[in-house]
Image (cartoon, rainbow, N blue to C red):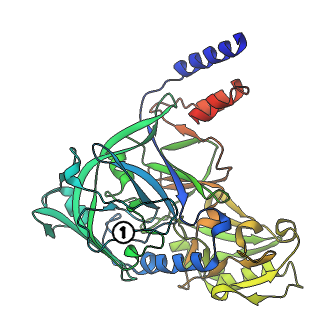
Amino acid sequence: MGIRFMIFFFVKVVLSILLVNGEVGGLFKVEHKFGSEANWTLIDLVAHDHHRHGRLLSAAIDIPLSGDGKTSGTGLYYTKLGIGTPPTDYFLLVDTGNDVLWVNCINCNPCANQTEIDGLKLKLYDPQRSSTSTKVSCGDPFCSYMNDGPGCSSYGGSCGYHQEYADGSETAGYIVTDTIRFDQVAGNHQTTFASSPITFGCGVQQSGNLVSPKGALDGLVGFGAATTSILSQLASSGKVKKKFAHCLDGKRGGGIFVMGGIVEPKLKTTPLVAHQTHYNVIMESIQVGDAVLNVSELLFGAADKKGAIIDSGTTLAYFPPAIFNPLRQLILASQPNLSIQFGEDFFECFEFNKSIDDEFPTVTFGFENSVQLNVYPRDYLILQKNHLGRYCLGWQESMKSDEIILGDLVLTNKLVLYDLEDQVLGLAEYNCSSPIGLDLSSSPARYNIRRVIKLLLLPSFMLYTCVQ
């Protein structure tokens, strides 16, 4: 007991020494709509992507992003967010390609009233039951941001919003401000509850896929770069830095979203392409074994202007035919005796009874600034549910001749940092169950208390896990 007490006391001293002032980090735990990999089917994943890409690629301009922003569809991951006073928990889709937070509200008609996601019960937000809820007027600057300029569709004198997606889905309602509650990691690296006023959409009319019970949730939280996003609002009030990161755990079906800078692990960064409606980076090459594909040459320079979309809301990866065909050939050439069959939704499938990681090549995407992203066979070959030993190539041709989209399965088990202050994107392979060091200080001094505790408290696992 004496030794344990001394260790505990010493760590308390270390914690008190490392207290720093400045911003806090927002922490969101996320879950996958389809659960762990064992519950996925290609039909589910492709159907999701088709709905999303109808919105992602063709939606009307509605939300400003440096003067030019598009709305997008929903994500594969969801999180719990407390809204109102007293707070009520709502389960919201997490989308890095959207700039708006909205929830289904009382008297919503039509709205999804049930979901096929196990264990979840949908709820409607009622502004009158929250003592901190206020409606936003048409003259409020936020109303102009939401409606892409002057003008207001009034809901009883309140600012209205309306977003229409290319797949026919719509969300409409009015704008309110209320308190949200989330986990924060403060300067002492302790996780506590935090709150902040946020302006968001109160949806009273939904249509299309938004009312379908398959994957339905209480709303959506967007992590886009526009003024209307939750990240921009929290950053403008000094709550967080204008940065966020995610690490998606493919095996367990969950992961984490963190708002704030990352100091551990160290990340290599590549510039974000300017004047794009999503998070785009320049892909220079694709290496399969010893063979290298020059992306710029294959796309006649088109990729140099637009780049590849990094989108955690898409499941698979999509490449133009000029890239997909040689990429596919290089992957399958490693096993020339495969008997290729067309499976669900025209995926190329085959039977294989050896280790795919040992027998198929690693694919390495090369980006500007010598940033590399390794994608292993277990990431691009999908084991068929209920078909032991049957795999399908989980990449497809994109719907546009210059469109590259890297989705969830490519980003799984990677730490991805979106730094909107420096306009860069950071990438690193990472075990998503491991601790992440946050930059919580306004000064040059940066600390990773998790690393200190891990070194000092090997016998005291509970204390380590409680503060990570």
Q: Residue at x 23, y 67 (%)?
A: 173
Q: Residue at x 54, y 85 (%)?
A: 399
Who's the residue at 64% across and 31% down the image?
A: 462
Residue 283 % position (x, y): 61, 69
What count of labels does the image hold? 1
Q: Is residue 139 left or right of residue 341?
A: left
- Hey, which quadrant is residue 239 in on the image? top left
Image quarter where the C terminus lies is top right
Residue 166 picture location, percent across and down: 38, 82
In depth, the one of 189 and 237 nearer the eye is 189
Tell me if residue 58 comes above or below residue 368 in the rendering: below
Is 266 situated left or right of 420 in this image? right
Compared to residue 320, the image places residue 172 above or below, namely above
Q: Is residue 158 above or below residue 207?
A: above
Tell me: 132 left or right of 37. Answer: left
User: Dot 1, how many residues are within 10 Å of its Cα: few (below 14), some (14-19), or many (20+)?
Assistant: some
- x and y percent of residue 168 in the render? 36, 83
Residue visible at 37% across and 74% down in the picture: 211
Residue 151 in view in this figure = no
- Which residue in the structure is indicated by mark 1? 113
Q: Quadrant of the N terminus?
A: top right
Kind of residue indicated by mark 1: Asn
- Return the residue found at the far top: 2
Quick one: SS at disc 1? loop
Res. 198 in view:
yes
